[in-house]
Amino acid sequence: MKAAIFFPCACLLILCLPALADLAAGQEALNNGDYASALKEFLPLANEGNAKAQVNLGWMYAGGHGVPQDDKEAVRWWRLAAGQGSADAKFRLGMVYHLGRGVQQDYKEAMRWYRLAADEGSAEAQCNLGLAYSEGVAVRQDYEEAVRWFRAAADRGHADAQFHLGLMHFEGHGTPQDAKEAARRWLLAAGQGNANAQFFLGALYSDGAGVPRDNKEALRWWRAAADQGHSGAQFNLGDGYRNGVGVPQDYILAHMWFNLSGANGDADGVKARQAIEKLMTGDQVAEAQRLAREWRPKPGK
């Protein structure tokens, strides 16, 4: 009797293996940028009702990866996956309504999809709900509710949620003001490569708020954010080199970082670059400009 029950289950598992293998092969191809191979694997699975394949196919259409860019087709696949309970698809539908991509922009509909995804554990949706409540977008502004959703996403390791939760603690919005807790949250996010958290963590070390004052540690975190293109961190790093605070004084590197900050839209960076040029030789300015031209952003973790 037990054998009769066991063997059909074993056969069922064997029958499922090719589909799982095809999905894994498609995912690997997608990760490697081999969109033609990914499409070959995902399309039949998506047509058979595989929700994960449908989500990935929607992503390919949304970005035009291996297929013509088509927001409406992306929405179609995500609706099919959402109908099967995919939290990822529900989050993405929230995004398209939020941005008006493939559908008419509708913040309330975006919040509905975000909430559905968030209730099923989507950290991305939970973070976006936190942002909505903190800013009062399509919902009544409610800092405590924002903190609740940020914390739910942060507990799942979501870096942006960690950053925003730290900001709520630092400002005392929806939770008691606590610079130490802000530093703890920003440290977690900064370790995941979040440039905003790195920037704010540098500011805490510079001011000695919630952490011991440490100019070298401040510059270390500002460099991490500056390397990703954060204009404020680039300015602060330039300021450190200009004044020799936390690093040896170096006008060439100061000019380079001010130049990059200004190019990223920081008006103070432009003014600082112009001011420090008056203290430099022509060769020094030329070297700083060369360094700025050759600089390339580094991705976060």
Image: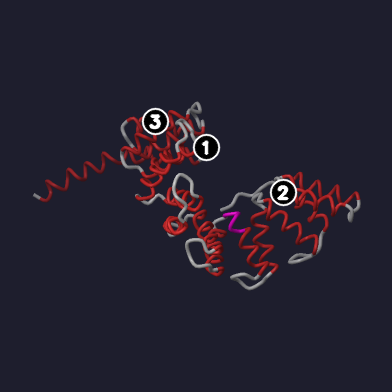
Looking at the picture, how far across and down is residue 149, in whole percent? Answer: 43, 55
Q: CA distance from mark 2 to mark 1?
A: 34 Å
Q: Which residue is mark 2?
A: 266
Q: Which residue is mark 3?
A: 76
- Amino acid identity at mark 2: Asp
User: Which label lies toward us, 3 or 1?
Assistant: 3
Asked if 291 appears above or below 251 in the picture, the reply is above
- Amino acid identity at mark 1: Gly
Q: For numbered disc 2, what is the local secondary structure? A: loop
Q: Residue at image x 64%, y 55%?
A: 225
Label 3 crowd bin: few (<14), some (14–19), many (20+), radius 10 Å = some
The reply to whether callout 3 and callout 1 are in contact (CB within 8 Å) is: no
- Residue situated in front as seen by the camera: 18 or 267: 267
- Residue situated in front as seen by the camera: 23 or 156: 156
Q: Residue at image x 75%, y 65%?
A: 247
Q: Can you tell which mark lies on residue 33?
A: 1
| Quarter of the rendering containing residue 249 | bottom right
Q: Residue furthest bottom?
A: 212
Q: CA distance from mark 3 to mark 1?
A: 23 Å
Instruction: Specify which label sits upstream in the sequence, 2 or 1.
Output: 1
Instruction: Specify which label sits upstream in the sequence, 3 or 1.
Output: 1
195 falls in the magenta region:
yes
Looking at the picture, how far across and down is residue 106, in whole percent? Answer: 45, 36
Q: Is residue 232 left or right of residue 114?
A: right
